[in-house]
Image (cartoon, helix red, strand yellow):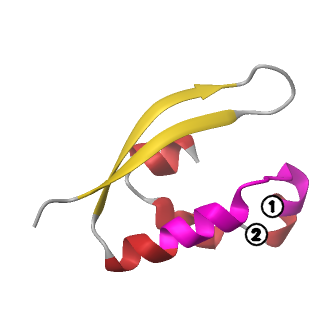
Amino acid sequence: MVNAIERDDIDSIKELSSKFVEAAKPDSLWQMAMLAGVSERVPLTPRLYSYQVPTYFGMICAGFQRDSE
């Protein structure tokens, strides 16, 4: 996901296999899917603020700003 955000390719979550998702056990898949859907209609610019792995899980802090028209 860090790479997808940095590449401005949030849509790539659609390509994650169900086996990968099950193994990763993300708690934000629904929110990422919603963001991918919105980004198909609304031009957004991503900004990765931080990625931390404090224990056994990683946390991403990112922002998505609507592009000016």
**In the picture provided, is 20 more to the left or to the right than 48?**
right
The kind of secondary structure element at disc 2 is loop
**In the picture provided, is 69 more to the left or to the right than 57?**
left
Q: Position of residue 3 (x, y in %)?
A: 50, 44
Residue 35 magenta: yes
- The residue that label 1 is drawn on is 21
Q: What number is the disc on residue 17?
A: 2
Q: What number is the disc on residue 11?
A: none
Q: Please determine whether, in this image, residue 54 is positioned above or below residue 45.
A: above
In the image, which residues are magenta? Answer: 21-36
CA distance separating discs 2 and 1: 6 Å
The residue shown at (71%, 56%) is: 28
Identify the main secondary structure in magenta.
Answer: helix
Q: Position of residue 8 (x, y in %)?
A: 37, 54
Number of marks in the rendered image: 2
Q: Position of residue 66 (x, y in %)?
A: 27, 59
The kind of secondary structure element at disc 1 is helix
The residue shown at (73%, 33%) is: 58
Residue 14 magenta: no
Q: Please determine whether, in this image, residue 50 is positioned above or below residue 6.
A: above
**In the picture provided, is 69 more to the left or to the right than 25?**
left
